[in-house]
Image (cartoon, grey):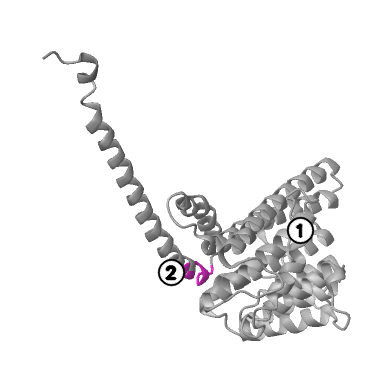
Amino acid sequence: MKLDNKKSSNWYKIPLILLLQLTLSTCSTVYKNTGNVLIGFAEDETVPYVLASNDLDLGCSMSKAFVPFILSFSRVTTQPNELAIMLYLLAGSCAEVQAGEEELRYLRAVYSKNVVEAQDARIAQKRLLNQAARRQLAGYNSLILALGEPGDECPELNSENAEFYWLIGLLDGLQAMLNDLASEGNANVPLDIASKVGRGASCLDNEQWWGLPKAIQAAIWVTIPGNKPADVDPLKVLDQSMQTGLQQGVRITQVLGAQIHMGLGHTDQVKAIIRRHQEAKTQTPTVPAFKLLDEFTTLQLQSISDRLWTEATGKRTPIAGLGTFWDDPEKAVDTINIDDMLQ
């Protein structure tokens, strides 16, 4: 019997195809299991570890590295939406910090009447604010996937972790909107996020979460007045929320308060917020599990202080000078610093 050479020459391809399919299937299983382990570890250990640290720069590095790495496992396993809420908020905040540095460059250029430098710095600032808005919008969209879209009905938040991620997701939405407005709307953040975030904040206990839910609502009422209830004074609500945060040792409400008053041109209130924050840090210890949030608050308030100092003097806040201002009635006697002379 004569064999068909064409058919017989392909006999070896059958086991190779089966071997390839088996290898791909094995790789997929390995990737999935690895992804589940890494995502679980990040949620259970990495995020709590970072939140309890006081090094915001390391938190920034972690978030920027983890966003593409951890979230890439969504291709082979369940998408880690809750983790993304936190990572995108941190990554967006990193871009905000960079934008703040560009704003200082702009203010120094204005102070020295360097028009071209001022224009360039403003462009760089808006680009970074745009980047921050896009990252925070991604965090808000992750909130929608994880727990549902904020709106008329409250989701079933059956654990403290779920409430925390809900709160952080609302912050993502609020900051995305504010940064988009500051960058001339180039990130295309929907403005209806504001009303949704405001309603979503009512789903949380204000006292339990450091006054932040009410502060979020107040910030939205001030920014978009059409959302404000007729019988509510947003600035009073904001002030009460800031007092709650100061007393509880998680003072992130001070950032919203300072941002809102800065936008309204209330420089004296902004100075008072910064002073109170510095006093509270010596009087009320930070909650250990949330040191990073308090460090973030201090850094943001320092950025606002730097803005005020630079606008008035051409230089940022002096070393160990947070809470003091150039026009304070009582000032320490100036001494000559040899380091300054050598610069």
Give neighbour class at mark 1: few <14, some 14-19, many 20+ (Cα, 10 Å).
Answer: some
Q: Residue at x 51, y 76 (%)?
A: 289
The secondary element bearing badge 2 is classed as helix
Give residue 91's quadrant in the image: bottom right
Residue 51 belongs to the span the image colors magenta: yes
330 lies above or below 60: below
Task: Estimate the spatial distance between the alpha carbons at disc 1 and disc 2, rounded to whole Å.
Answer: 43 Å
Q: Which residue is mark 2?
A: 44
Q: Secondary structure at mark 1?
A: loop
Q: First in sequence: mark 1 or mark 2?
A: 2
**Farthest-out residue, front:** 1
Magenta-tinted stretch: 48-54
Percent position of residue 66, x then y: 49, 55
- Quadrant of residue 281 in the image? bottom right
Residue drawn 13% across and 13% down? 2
Taking 333 as reference, is 154 left or right?
left
Say whether residue 45 is left or right of residue 100. left
The answer to whether 40 appears left or right of 276 in the picture is left
Tags 1 and 2 in contact by the CB under 8 Å rule? no
Counting from the top left corner in percent of width and height, residue 26 is at 30, 46
The amino acid pointed to by label 2 is Asp
Please give the residue where the numbered disc 1 appears in the rendered image: 315
The dot on residue 3 is none
Residue placed at 82% from the left, 76% from the top?
Answer: 269
Tell me where residue 124 appears, x and y as whole percent.
73, 46
